[in-house]
Image (cartoon, rainbow, N blue to C red):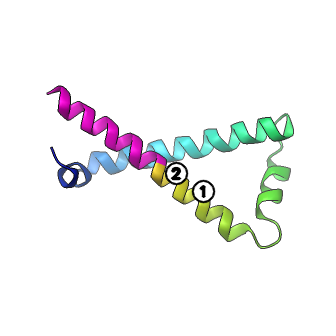
Amino acid sequence: MGFKSIISQKRFWKSVLWLGLTFLVLYNVISMLFEYGGFAFAEFFEERTSDGKLFRFIFAQILAAFLYGFILAFGQFRSKEKKK
């Protein structure tokens, strides 16, 4: 199964979405715990979005989630095909 056939599957894109969202949540929670020593949602997001950094924060989060989800999902789908 080639690249085009993998990315043309609806299941692939669902995996990309869920893996990306899971990554976003876990990454931000773990970052918050390490930086603030607890669940400090207000301070965490205020620091990252203040001084006009809101667009940069949102763009970086979406890009990171997409790349992480895409790479992992592609690896999973590719490995399933190799096992067949």
Q: Secondary structure at mark 1?
A: helix
Displayed quadrant of residue 47:
bottom right
Q: Would you say the magenta stretch is mainly helix, strand or loop?
A: helix
Residue 51 lies, with reference to residue 76, above or below; the image says below
Residue labelled with disc 2: 65
Q: Give the side of residue 16 with respect to residue 38, left or right.
A: left
Displayed quadrant of residue 37:
top right
Mark yes or no: residue 6 visible: yes
- Nearer-the-camera pick, 60 or 13: 60
Residue labelled with disc 1: 61
Q: Residue at x 49, y 47 (%)?
A: 20
Tell me residue 7's x, y (percent): 26, 53
Residue 75 lies, with reference to residue 52, above or below; the image says above
Please name the amino acid that badge 2 sits on: Ala
**Region of the chain picked out in magenta, as a range:** 68-84
Q: Give the side of residue 2 with respect to residue 43, left or right.
A: left
Q: CA distance from mark 1 to mark 2?
A: 6 Å
Q: Secondary structure at mark 2?
A: helix
Q: Give the side of residue 49 with respect to residue 79, left or right.
A: right
Tell me residue 2's x, y (percent): 17, 48
Q: Is residue 67 magenta?
A: no
Asked whether the beta carbons under mark 1 and mark 2 sit within 8 Å of each other, the answer is yes
Q: Residue at x 14, y 27 (%)?
A: 84
Please name the amino acid that badge 1 sits on: Gln
Residue reaching furthest to the top: 83
Q: Give the side of residue 23 with respect to residue 40, left or right.
A: left
